[in-house]
């Protein structure tokens, strides 16, 4: 009888340890997935040849267009994938309802990093 009780305790102990180990590894995996999803934008790395245009505006949430294509709202960090080793002209337009649009023609080439901070004027 003591032998059966001892074996039962050992089996239950083994099952409990297995469940605990499973839950431990499940928690570690979940924590590492959450950590990977919370990478701040400012830590984003760009390659040496990537062309990046950053635009901040007052007021924020203005629409940004490059060569007529919508790229997002301010503040924006835009990678211009069409830039090459030869400088090309790009037209940047920032607009918001109730404000005069801001446009700028710039020469960009591979590896350029440009930052524009602007204040839109009320119409």
Image: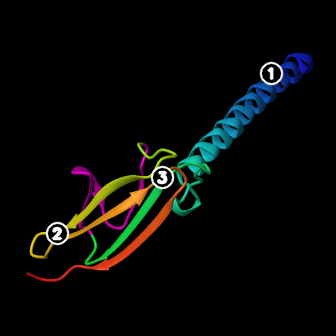
- Closer to the eye: label 3 or 1: 3
Judged from the image, the secondary structure of the residue bearing numbered disc 3 is: loop
The image's mark for residue 52 is none
Judged from the image, the secondary structure of the residue bearing numbered disc 1 is: helix
Where in the figure is residue 66, as x and y percent of width and height? 29, 54
Where in the figure is residue 9, as x and y percent of width and height? 82, 26
Q: Is residue 14 above or below residue 91?
A: above
Frontmost residue, 4 versus 46 = 46
Mark 3 and 1 residues: CB-CB less than 8 Å, in contact?
A: no
The image's mark for residue 109 is 3
Residue designated by label 2: 96
The image's mark for residue 11 is 1
Left or right of 85? Residue 103 is left
Left or right of 52? Residue 17 is right
N-terminal-most mark, 3 or 2: 2
N-terminal-most mark, 3 or 1: 1
| Residue displayed at 40% across by 59% down | 107
| Residue displayed at 84% across by 22% down | 5
Question: What range is drawn magenta here?
Answer: 61-81
Frontmost residue, 62 versus 79 = 79
For the residues labelled 2 and 1, the Cα–Cα distance comes to: 69 Å
């Amino acid at each position: 009888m003591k032998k059966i009780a001892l074996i039962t305790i050992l089996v239950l102990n083994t099952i409990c340890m297995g469940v605990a180990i499973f839950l431990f590894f499940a928690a570690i995996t979940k924590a590492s997935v959450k950590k990977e999803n919370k990478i701040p934008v400012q830590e984003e790395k760009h390659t040496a040849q990537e062309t990046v245009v950053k635009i901040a505006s007052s007021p924020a949430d203005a629409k940004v267009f490059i060569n007529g294509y919508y790229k997002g709202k301010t503040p924006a960090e835009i990678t211009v994938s069409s830039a090459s080793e030869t400088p090309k002209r790009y037209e940047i337009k920032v607009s918001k309802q109730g404000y005069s649009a801001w446009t700028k023609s710039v020469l960009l080439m591979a590896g350029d990093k440009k930052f524009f901070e602007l204040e839109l004027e009320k119409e």
